[in-house]
Each structure stands twice: as C-alpha cells, then as structure tokens.
Amino acid sequence: MTGPPLAGERGWPSATAVVVGVIGDPVSHSLSPTLHNAAFASLGLDWVSVAFPVAPGALASALPGARALGLRGLSVTMPFKDAVAAIVDRSSPIATRLGAVNCVVVEPDGLVGHNTDGEGFVAALRRGARFDPAGRRCVVAGAGGAARAVVLALARAGASEVVVVGRTPARAADAAALAGHAGRTGTPTDAGGADLVVNATPVGMGGTPAATDPPLVDPGLLSHGQLAVDLVYVPRPTRWLELAAARGAATLDGLGMLVHQAALQIELWSGRSAPVEAMWAAVAGQRPEVPAPGG
Ligand code: NAP
C-alpha cells in the first residue's frame, strides 16, 4: 500500500474502513467524530470516526482493545487525558511534559500518546485572530488541563510573559512553571496590561454548574488593543466574550481550538494535511449541546 486507503465506489465507510474514535465519559455529545469525518470525506479517505463511551473502570482494557481491533487511533477527552498518559507505551515530548494525552496513535510497536490541545490553540490564534504570541504578554485564567496546554504552547511560541491566574494557588504555580522563565502566577489585575487574556475555566459554559459563576478575570479590566479568548464554545459567544467585546477588545471563542486540535490529530493518524476549512464548515453552524468537553 502506498498511502492511506481511498474511499471506494461501494460507499463510505466500507467494511474495511480504517477506524478511529473518541473516548470519554460522557462522549455522545462530542463534536470530534463530526470533525474527523468531515476531514476524511474531504480527503477521500475510507476512514471513519465514532464515539466510544468508556466507563472509567474500563479504560485500562479499552486501549489494548483498540489495538487488538486494528483501530488507527483515538482522540481522548474528559476525564481520561491524564490516565491515558500513564497507559500509553510512549509519549511525545509535549504530552510527557503535560502528563496528559488527547490523541493516541496506534503504531505497530505500541500506543503513542500526543497532546494537540496547545498547538491547536496557537493555530486558532494565528488563523482566527491573526495573533502571533511571540513577544506578547499573556494571561491565562485557570490551571486545569486546558490551561496547562495553553500555557506551555504560548511559551513555546515565544510569549514574553505567561501569567496564570487561578483559584487554587498550588495548581496555578504548577501551571505557570510550564512556561519556564516566562511563567509566573498573578492576579486578575494583570489582565489590564496583557496583549492576550484567555479564559481556560468552565465559567460561562452553558448547562454546567459554573455557567453563572463570576469569571476569574473581570471583563471590565479589558479594553481596545487586547485579544480575549474563551476556550468555552457553548454558547458562542460566551457572556464573558460579549462583555470583553463591549469594552473594545478583539474576541475569539473556543471552536477554533477544537477544530485545530482535531486537525492535528488527523495529521498524526493519516500523515496527510488536514482540510481545516472543511472541518470548520462541518461544525461552524452547529449548536453543540452540553456537555461538550473540549475534544
Ligand atoms: P479542568 O481540568 O477541570 O480545569 C478547570 C480549571 O478551571 C481549574 O483550574 C479550576 O480551578 C478552574 N475552575 C473551575 N471552575 C471554576 C470556577 N467556578 N471559578 C474559577 N475557576 C474555576 O478543565 P479543563 O479540561 O482545563 O477545561 C476547562 C474549560 O476549557 C472547559 O470549559 C472545557 O470545555 C474547555 N476546553 C475547550 C477546549 C477547546 O478545544 N475549545 C479544549 C479543552 C478544554 P482549580 O484549579 O481550583 O480546580
């Protein structure tokens, strides 16, 4: 075989289609299969992506099972990103540094863990907001898995400063350390002097307990010349982004990060350039239902 199998005349997917999937709990609302399948259709590949709900106690057997069944890979969403990092046979440097995996590639010699969240975030910044983090001052609100990926990616992209604002000091310090010399913890007022302010908490996410919680960074601190990015994309835009826009800040919601982290997964699995526009078109008009964890 000289490359990935192409979709045949007998329709898609064929009985011999290459299978990938997304594992999570819950996972039925994930947009990942829609994104992956839009990419496969655009590339003409006889591949298919489906959602696999996995009970937490079944994770340790689900991964070897994926290999036994000949799956090409898995996208990994909440709550399994950390646990999968401990199960795979080896990991990329970024996934190792984060201790979290959002993409597994099934290679002949084992399961390889990657994390495309941070790179997907930076790609979304560049493409969706024409924002290059190099030399920029950045504030990240939150210190969980998404925040950690964003902090590391901003530092790798050359941000001059990455300030983490979190509600749990030890977690904020741990996340800030990922940015090396550029990283430190801070307070919400740091947002006033930043070029980029990111909400990486679930605050504002429709249908969750955090939907109406106060944001860590008051949008009243933002103004013209700044970019506000909310990783949350349910609803689009969030109230926080609406208020940031009313203050004159440029805004970007979390759908771009979702598309780009999935595009990078397509490239890891297939070795082909991902058709980002086709993937965007597949989800841009959708109203994702809650729960819609990233990925
Ligand atoms: P996580 O690991 O649970 O971390 C959540 C972080 O937010 C923690 O630091 C937590 O504080 C903080 N937090 C939670 N509730 C808060 C509240 N009411 N007030 C202030 N801080 C609060 O979650 P995650 O995986 O990082 O995800 C965070 C958000 O990003 C979710 O809404 C998720 O859907 C979204 N996300 C989007 C994408 C995308 O592609 N667009 C990708 C990944 C995640 P503590 O440190 O005190 O626990």
Image: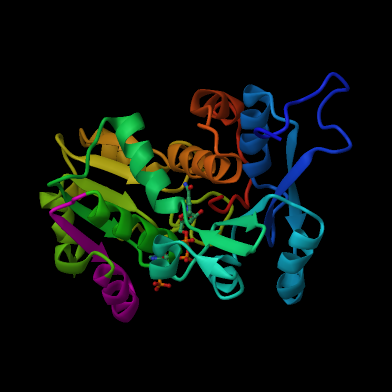
Tell which of 278 and 195 is nearer to you.
Answer: 278
Tell which of 166 and 150 is nearer to you.
Answer: 150
Q: On the rendered structure, is 39 left or right of 48? A: left
- Can residue 225 be seen in the rendering of this structure? yes
Please provide percent x and percent y for residue 174.
Answer: 31, 75
Please provide percent x and percent y for residue 256.
Answer: 44, 37
Q: Which residues are magenta?
A: 158-177
Q: On the rendered structure, is 236 left or right of 279? A: left
Q: On the rendered structure, is 154 left or right of 221? A: right
Residue 218 among those drawn in magenta: no
Please provide percent x and percent y for residue 164.
Answer: 25, 64
Q: Residue furthest top?
A: 9
Where is residue 58, by image quadrant? bottom right
**Coloured how?**
rainbow
Residue 175 among those drawn in magenta: yes
Where is residue 106, by image quadrant? bottom right
**Residue shown at 42%/44% (left/top)?**
120
Q: How many marks?
A: 0
Q: Residue furthest front?
A: 1
Tell which of 222 and 214 is nearer to you.
Answer: 222
**Residue shown at 50%/29% (left/top)?**
276
> Is the residue 92 above or below the residue 120 in the image?
below
Image region (quadrant) for ligand 1 = bottom left
**Residue shown at 30%/34% (left/top)?**
126
- Can residue 186 be seen in the rendering of this structure? no
> Is the residue 295 above or below the residue 176 in the image?
above
Tell which of 104 and 35 is nearer to you.
Answer: 104
The N terminus lies in quadrant: top right
